[in-house]
Structures are given as structure tokens and as C-alpha cells.
Amino acid sequence: MTTLLQKLKKAHLTIVLTILSLMVETSSLAQVNLSAVLNGTDPVEKGSTFEVIIRAEAGTLNVNGIQVLLEFDPAFVSAQSVVINSPFIFIFQDFSTSGEAEFAGGILVGGQTGTFDFATVTFQALETTVPGTTTINFNTDPGRGDRTAVAEQGTANDITGSMTPLTLAIDEPLSSVGVNKTIKLNAFPNPSKSKITFKIGENGESINTITLTDINGRVVEVIEAGNTANNYTLNLGKYSKGLYVAKITTTTGKTGQEKIIIE
């Protein structure tokens, strides 16, 4: 029987983000199982890249070659690259078909047993997609010829193990999901000669710092409010007359600013 490594060197294959049927050539009845595992947190943000690990569970089987065919929805994600993990060496990859990714690696001498991470695939969640759930699935259709996921050990029986796909959510970036980073700031009396009070009107917010900037954009002082109140009174005696911009930052990171005049 032609070995997997020989077939891979001759074949020109297209990658599909679905791990195809896994077959192990061995002299005893056994199985090798493959799974797609997200290396990160779910949900994945639109426009971001994320990694999917292709994990193999071989038990006592000595595997010396793996070919993977993945299948995915190109409306949600696109395959960017693949890294074949040691001790396997890279044989080929093909990302030329939309919604598919295929790659293979092998070991020239010896093999790999137990549970191991065969490859790491980098994907990108499309910026234009509508938030939702998508699956990176194993394609086990045997009717696609050499386009099938297989693991080999020598030239004996091919045994197909289980395939565990990855389902994940694609969501809006956290910074754009209803997060308002600005806050309304009131300053009174304004203009003032002696003192001025800054007050924010949003419940649950407290003033953390006040940054005074002069008309030329130079930072005059950063005042640490040092309390948990929603207002702060500033004595103006040490400042020169003129126009300033006061910018406050709350304890939750929100900001607001107001022009003030010191007489």
C-alpha cells in the first residue's frame, strides 16, 4: 500500500476547515481521534485573529504521518496559516479554496504516541460578518479521493477514529459594544477668581484625576482627586489668569472635559 507520506509528496491538495476522516495504518484494531480546540477565549472578536489547535489522541499507536482537511463557513472566518508542530515536519498546505484548508506533516524516522498537538492553524474572524455562531468541522466524506484526513503507521489497516469539531461565537469587539467612554462634566462658578467645583452627573462614577491644560496645550497640573465623590472643588490661587481646559478621568476610566476661565 502506498504510504501517506508518499501520497502527500505527489498530491496537490486543497485545505478545508474540517478535519476529514482519520485513518491509522496498524497491525492491531485501534483508533486515532482528532479534535479542533480553540486556543483562547470564546467569543472571538470580529476582525481579530485566533488559533485552532488540531489535537490527536493516538494511545499506544505510533503515528508517523497526519493529513488534515478542514471545512468552515467563509462568511465568518478565513484560514491564514498553519504551523506543524515538532516532531512532525511540514509536507504541504493548501488554502486556495474558499471555506477549506488542508495540510499535512510527517515523521521520517519513528513516530508519535499518546495525546499530542499536531498543528496550530491561525484564522481571522471577518470584520464584515454579522455576529453569530460558526463551526470548524471535520469532513469525513470518503468520496473526495486523497482529500481526506488520515494518520498513518506503516502499511497495515486504516482505522478511522472520532472527529470533534469546534463551535465558537463571533462577536463585536468589546470596546464597541455599548460602552460609552465619555461623561458630562459641569464646572461652576465659571469664570471664577478663587475656586471652582467640578461635578459629574452620572450615578456610580467618581472623579479620579483632573488634568489642567493651558491654551497652548501644555499640561499645567494633574490633580489627584483622592476621593470617591462625584464632585471636586479646586482652589485657583496658584494659577495664572487665563483660559484652561479641565479634563477629568473617573475611577472607571471615563473622561469628560470643560473649558474654564480663571480671572
Image (spheres, rainbow, N blue to C red):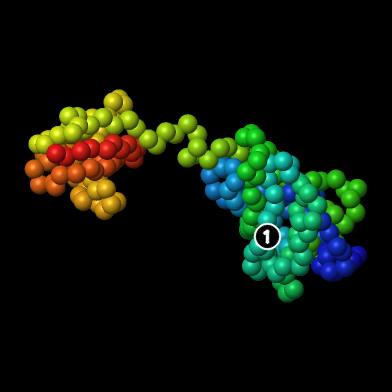
Who is closer to the viewer here, 254 or 157? 254
Classify residue 244 as left or right of residue 5.
Answer: left
- Vertical side of 219 occupied by 42: above or below: above
Instruction: Note whether residue 31 is visible.
Output: no
Instruction: Note whether residue 183 is visible.
Output: yes
Return the x and y of residue 35 as percentages of the image width and height: 68, 48
**What's the residue at 32%, 30% (across, down)?**
184
Report the residue marked by disc 1: 82
Q: Residues within 10 Å of mark 1 (few under 14, many from 20)?
A: many
Q: Quadrant of residue 189?
A: top left
Q: Quadrant of residue 208?
A: top left
Q: Secondary structure at mark 1?
A: strand
Classify residue 247 as left or right of residue 35.
Answer: left
Q: Quadrant of the N terminus?
A: bottom right
Which residue is farthest bottom? 109
**What's the residue at 77%, 65% (across, down)?**
92
**What's the residue at 69%, 67% (across, down)?**
88
> Amino acid under label 1?
Val
Who is closer to the viewer here, 167 or 218? 218
Return the x and y of residue 10 as percentages of the image width and height: 88, 68
- Vertical side of 188 occupied by 224: above or below: below
Return the x and y of residue 178 as percentages of the image width and height: 47, 31
**Number of numbered tags placed on the structure image:** 1
Return the x and y of residue 153 as percentages of the image width and height: 78, 64
Who is closer to the viewer here, 115 or 117? 117
Q: Quadrant of the C terminus?
A: top left
**What's the residue at 28%, 52% (across, down)?**
216
